[in-house]
Image (tube, helix red, strand yellow):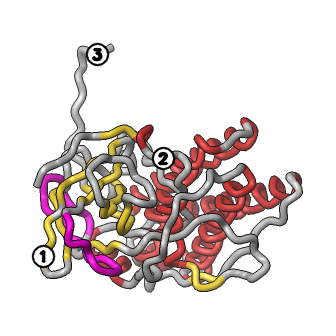
Amino acid sequence: MIVGESHSWSLVDPNLYIDLTYTMRFAYAASVLFATLALAAPVALQKRAALGDIDILQFALTLEHLENAFFKQGLSTWSVDEFVKANFTESFYSQLKYITHDEETHVLYLEAALKTAGATPVAACSYKFPMTNPHDFVALAATIDGVGAAAYLGAAPLLTSKSYLTAAASILVTEALHQSATRNAVGEVPMANPFGTPMGANAVYSIASQFITSCPDSNTPLPVKPYPGLTISQGMPVAVNTSVSFSVDGQLPSAQCYITFVSGLDILPVEGSVSNGMISAEIPSQVSGQSYAFVTSDNSGNLTDTSILFGPAVLEVTPSSPTFDLSIT
């Protein structure tokens, strides 16, 4: 496998954005959760006009509705005693209650902002989350929190209002704190990557929409579409410099295609190897923590609606041992 040149996220088309939904996490639990999800059938995708501020607020509210419903379902399903029996602490259970409070507050804040702007806020949808025990819930929470943070980070360059940008950055910080708490609770390194990973709206929606079963007809349609699905074939976490295989929701092209890994600010195309309907590639050494993989038609590192064929799949990649230079002061 040949790893392509590392690219900065600045090369990504800032007009491309995704919606919401879910991804995987934590060893065996993650692989089971991922196997239960399937994206919608492939759709024709075209490059869309840049999202406006109101579109972005509605998109953010859609994601916050999902997170609000998810955390409330988890806390209403399992008691503190059941979390303790699953090897979580009472202190962590208390943190989950704070996270739930935060998500509800985000919903109320965004609804108020949209009403002030003269828009009708989108209402909550109906959801289905693949979790059967407290561990499933916390593992999935870590993934969803990471996707939420990636959505806010990716949307930031598109906001024209400085007030909205400040609010989005403020929520982003809180989402990152949530993910740190949940990652730590399932034994993952909270700060596995020196940088957050920005994700476009269509990529985020490709993940989030897997949890959405239906939405009110009265909701304003969002200008986003999911990409055809990409599913990892092995359990999480995975390691750098090892091969990882994926199945796709559709048929792989006969022409050469690539697995493009997105991790922090790195966009890393790797030549894909196709066999028996699966595509595999070696994970580059720069990939760390919650990262994402796309099947792309080229190795330019420029992720667009035309270059993305399938994805994203969510990966949990074990970070390498930390290094630092004590002479740098």
Q: In this orientation, which residue lies closer to the viewer: 180 or 49? A: 49
**In this rendering, would 186 be left or right of 46?**
left
- Asked whether the viewer can see residue 91, the reply is no
**In this rendering, would 218 be left or right of 309?**
right
**In this rendering, would 255 be left or right of 154?**
left
Q: Where does the image place residue 219, in percent across and percent down from the top left?
A: 75, 74
Mark 3, secondary structure of its residue:
loop
Q: Is residue 270 above or below residue 312?
A: above
Mark 2, secondary structure of its residue:
loop
Q: Which residue is mark 2?
A: 13
Is 254 contained in the magenta span? Answer: yes
Is 28 contained in the magenta span? Answer: no
Q: How packed is label 2: few (under 14 Cα within 10 Å), some, or many (20 or more)?
A: some
Badge number at residue 9: none
Badge number at residue 328: 3
Looking at the image, is mark 3 or mark 1 earlier in the sequence? 1
What residue appears at the point 58 percent right and 62 percent down from the top-left corner? 94
Badge number at residue 275: 1
Distance in Å between CA atoms under marks 3 and 1: 47 Å
Distance in Å between CA atoms under marks 1 and 2: 31 Å
What residue appears at the point 73 percent right and 82 percent down from the top-left corner? 216
Chain part drawn in magenta = 236-255
Q: Is residue 133 above or below residue 56?
A: below
Label 1 amino acid?
Answer: Ser
Secondary structure mostly seen in the magenta stretch: loop
Looking at the rendering, which quadrant does residue 34 occupy?
bottom left
What residue appears at the point 47 percent right and 57 percent down from the top-left corner? 146
